[in-house]
Image (cartoon, grey):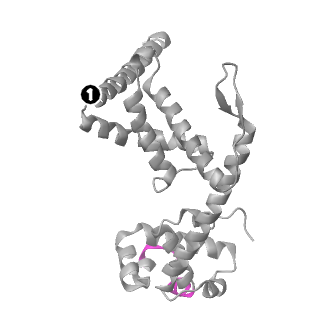
Amino acid sequence: MGPTRIKSWFNTLRSKSDDDIETKVVHAQNGDQLVREQLIRQYQPFVKKTLSKACRRYISESMDEFSIGLMAFNEAIDKFDNKQGSKFLTFATVVIKRRIIDFIRKESKHNHILLAEEEDEEGNSQENYLEQKMSIDSFNAEVESRSRVEEIKEYQRLLSDYDITFKVLTTQCPKHYDARENAKQIAKLVADNIEIRSYLKEKKRLPIKEIELLVSSSRKTIERNRKYIIAMALIYIGEFHALRSYIEPEEGGE
């Protein structure tokens, strides 16, 4: 099969896939709730990607923005008209971006941040890109700051269940780069291993003997960094997204 035929075959498949989406949308518009739910579930990654691009930051499923995106996608299903010639996903992208901008504008006004607007050649109101970006970035920074504070409070409460405080962590943190990275790797193993994770959550301590069988570190080393390993593991286990940046591999060494 030559390059021209391959390209034609690929375009045919892509066109067929687009037609399948449009067909499903029509079925959903006609009352097929199962198809509607399948569409929303299937295109959640698309919704997250669209939101992340619009907000210029990662949007997770636990965020309000994601819920707004799903509602916008559902709205797009209701309002899509294939007679206008546009593709459904193109239309859905526009609806999602409009709804998330509406949300950001509302939250921005609540936080005394105004979005500038200008008119395009057709007289339609359109957000000025630079002003919008500055406002969104400012709002995002404020939201992220509040989110980080809440995560730290929740993390502090979780640590107390293991008899660990921030003050203790400052003294328990390994001083050398290699030792810290090794402890973080053990912490990730603890979080990823179902049996070890369950033991930690139930007993509030590390099953050091079992961990020793899975890593190259000595029992003495694991014991010495025990509280630091637990603290790092809890960040993974508790899905503290804002705090993960603090435990990602460090650049360079000491």
Place of residue 119 in the rendered image (x, y in percent of width and height, measured from the top left): 70, 27
Is residue 195 rendered to the left or right of residue 111? left
Q: Residue at x 43, y 78 (%)?
A: 211
Q: Is residue 247 visible?
A: no
Q: Residue at x 49, y 44 (%)?
A: 48
Dot 1: what SS? loop
Place of residue 130 in the rendered image (x, y in percent of width and height, measured from the top left): 75, 39
Relative height, residue 118 to residue 61 (above, below): above
Q: Which residues are magenta?
A: 213-224
Res 191 → quadrant: bottom left
The residue indicated by pointer 1 is 30
Relative height, residue 229 to residue 77 (above, below): below
Place of residue 160 in the rendered image (x, y in percent of width and height, measured from the top left): 50, 85
Crowd rating for badge 1 (residues with CA inside 10 Å; few <14, some 14–19, many 20+) = few
Q: Is residue 4 visible?
A: yes
Magenta stretch: residue 70 in it? Answer: no
| Foreground of the two, 116 or 201 | 116
Is residue 196 rendered to the left or right of residue 54? left
Q: Residue at x 45, y 72 (%)?
A: 190
Is residue 113 rendered to the left or right of residue 78? right
| Foreground of the two, 30 or 66 | 30
Magenta stretch: residue 217 in it? Answer: yes
Res 180 → quadrant: bottom right
Task: Assign the N terminus to one quadrant of the image.
Answer: top left
Q: Inspect the image, locate mark 1, and give the three-letter code of the amino acid beneath it.
A: Asn
Place of residue 198 in the rendered image (x, y in percent of width and height, measured from the top left): 35, 75
| Foreground of the two, 83 or 37 | 83
| Foreground of the two, 203 or 91 | 91
Task: Assign the C terminus to one quadrant of the image.
Answer: bottom right
Q: Residue at x 49, y 53 (%)?
A: 64
Question: Magenta stretch mostly in which secondary structure?
Answer: helix
